[in-house]
Amino acid sequence: MTTVVVTRHGETAWTREERIQGWAPVAMTEAGREQVRALGVELGRRYDVDRVLSSDLRRTAETTELLRDDVDAPVTWDEAWRERDFGVFQGLLASAWFERFPAYDLWENGIDAARETPESGESLVDLRERIVAAWEGLLDDCGPDETVLVVAHGGPIRLVLGHVKGLDVAASMEQTQAMCAINEFDYDAETEETHIVCENETAPPTDGR
């Protein structure tokens, strides 16, 4: 049985402010680093990770480097696991985005909003295609007893969970995904079945080390 653990990066100033980050090179806050330290302790306790796949954006790269204190495994930087490219909307407050550009409101406009493409960015449908391809490629490449850690972003993780559950794009994006949450999947290559073992689990705080 293959085990895939997918986690989100730690808090940044923009996640705290609820700004659209996209591919922006935003650093983690100290609170975010504490979240990652707690995550590392929990990952080290629960898993024997064979390798790590990480988005190459700054906040995920910082998360992955900090996790190496507790996760001793080789890292591959993979842009396929990046967050959605929001193009010209990057840096906007999420609330202001929907107010000024209601065509992108997924909960009001459903699949039509998911097909809307920001200037110099990508649509949510495009993101889903990218992430599902990355996920299926990962499963094809995994060994039968391998444990792989993926360090990614809120949008891609919601879409992976939605894909495994058979949800549409809108329902996938309604799922909650906390900073540094643990999502564990078991994959049986013989049956090609994937089971969600846990989702959106947060690690207990550390003793401050």
Image (cartoon, helix red, strand yellow):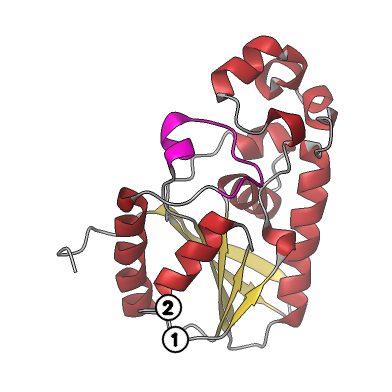
Q: Residue at x 72, y 74 (%)?
A: 139
Q: Disc 1, disc 2: CB below 8 Å?
A: yes
Which secondary structure class fits the magenta region best?
loop
Q: How far from the left and from the top, in percent, is residue 176? A: 49, 40
Image quadrant where residue 85 sits = top right
Relative image position of residue 8 (x, y in whole percent): 50, 55
Q: Is residue 17 magenta?
A: yes
Q: In terms of depth relative to the viewer, which is nearer, 170 or 130?
A: 130
Q: Which residue carries the number 1 mark?
A: 72
Task: Give the spatial CA distance, label 1 vs label 2.
Answer: 6 Å
Which part of the image, by quadrant, shows the N terminus? Answer: bottom right
Q: Residue at x 62, y 37 (%)?
A: 173
- Number of other residues with Cα within 10 Å of mark 2, as a class: few under 14, some 14 to 19, many 20 or more: some
Instruction: Identify the residue shown where x is 74% and y is 30%.
Output: 88
Amino acid type, residue under disc 2 in the picture = Arg
> Residue 7, image x and y in percent?
50, 60
Query: Would you say 71 lies left or right of 116 here?
Result: left
Horizontal placement of 21 versus 135: left or right?
left
Question: Circle 1: is it few (<14), some (14-19), or many (20+) Cα within 10 Å?
Answer: some
Disc count in the image?
A: 2
Q: Is residue 44 left or right of residue 49?
A: left
| Residue 122 vertical position relative to residue 116 in the rendered view, above or below | below
Q: What range is drawn magenta here?
A: 13-25
Say if residue 184 shows up in the picture.
no
Q: Which residue is mark 2?
A: 68
Q: Secondary structure at mark 1?
A: loop
In what quadrant of the picture does the C terminus appear? bottom left
